Amino acid sequence: MYINNIVFQTSHYVGILLDTIFYGVELVIYSASVRIILRGKANGMPSRGSCLLLFFSTGLLLPITLWVVSQAALGQDMWIAHPVNAEGSPRYLGINVVPMWYEIVGCVASLVLNTMSDGLLLYRCYIVWGDGRVIILPFIIYLATMPLGVLAVYVSDRPQSILLFGASQRLVLAYVSVGISLNFLVSTLICVRILLLAKRLEVALGEEAAHTYTNTATLIIESALPYTLSGLAYLVALGMQSSTSILFMSIYVMFACLSPQIIVFRVLMGHAWTRDAVTRSTASVLLTTAIVYPGAVDSSVEPGTGHWRATIELRTVNDPAFSTIDQDVVASEV
């Protein structure tokens, strides 16, 4: 593979800058999420669920921190420790007899992030659809990514091998291809489901309340669209053996952390899709009636029928305590 040294170094430099910016965004969202949990203000969520989200968010923060450190260490090794390599910094990366620690840390961190993010996406897909059969195929693909990822990390950490440019590139390409296929499939399923439920939810909750669940931002966040699109860009660059692969890899890994973290934050704020929102949008909207007798009631006998007709008041009741069945006004026979 031909590596353009200037393009590679520039891509890695820009990648480090973006890593720093995105890491700052991650810290802000994580801090806001922790604050909501510690103050017990998670919208309609039991303490156990809040604790699980806290552990999950922390589980995202730790590997992304290791990723940012490993990328910075790679830059320090290329530009400061070995700046005068005759064939450029990429050549230095390819001739290491023993893999550097930051290579191993970076690979493991990205694998953990992808596994956690894909797992959350699968769960969110199940929540939105409310049917486990929908995620059978994505779950099988998800299981296939795990051994592929472990194998890719193992091969890339062997002597004279690197994740992007060594002999492990084909295996890494296979792992990324399967992972991106999973992202694309699950994101598509979530987007389609939200669009299908949008109109029903407006009927069930009203246009203003439904807007929280059906606007464009919700569609992008719930489907983790930035994560999927950045993965597609990385896959194309890697498949073309482009020197910019390291830049797109950095963006992809950062969104593997940011996308699920934003979803967690929306869940804590009560703005994300839940089982209750899906149930209300899929249930048939039926007219519930309540018969009210405010003292004296106007009554009359229907001519020629012998039936009494009572005047009643009809109300639309948005209360689960009332039975949601169709009711007819029935006259009592004398």
Image (cartoon, rainbow, N blue to C red):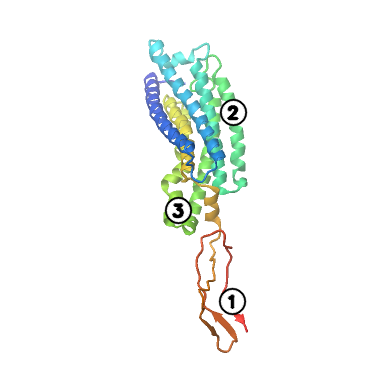
- Report crowding for label 2: few under 14, some 14 to 19, many 20 or more residues within 10 A (C-alpha): some
Query: In the rendering, at what x and y percent does residue 183 appear?
Result: 52, 38
Looking at the image, tell me whether mark 3 or mark 2 is earlier in sequence order: 2
Residue that badge 2 annotates? 148
- Residue 202, compared with residue 135, is above or below; it is below
Q: Position of residue 305 (x, y in %)?
A: 59, 87
Residue at numbered disc 1: 330
Name the N-terminal-most of marks 2 and 1: 2
How would you rate the neighbour count of disc 1 (Cα within 10 Å): few for under 14, some for 14-19, many for 20 or more? few
- Furthest toward the front, the residue is 295
Pick the residue in front: 332 or 278: 332
Dot 1 lies on which element?
Answer: loop
Q: Please tell me whether mark 3 or mark 2 is closer to you in this view.
A: 3
In the picture, the quarter occupied by the C terminus is bottom right
Residue at numbered disc 3: 210
Residue 221 quadrant: top left
Q: Can residue 227 be seen in this view?
A: no
* Upstream in sequence: badge 1 or badge 3: 3
Q: Which amino acid does label 2 sit on?
A: Leu
Local SS, label 3:
helix
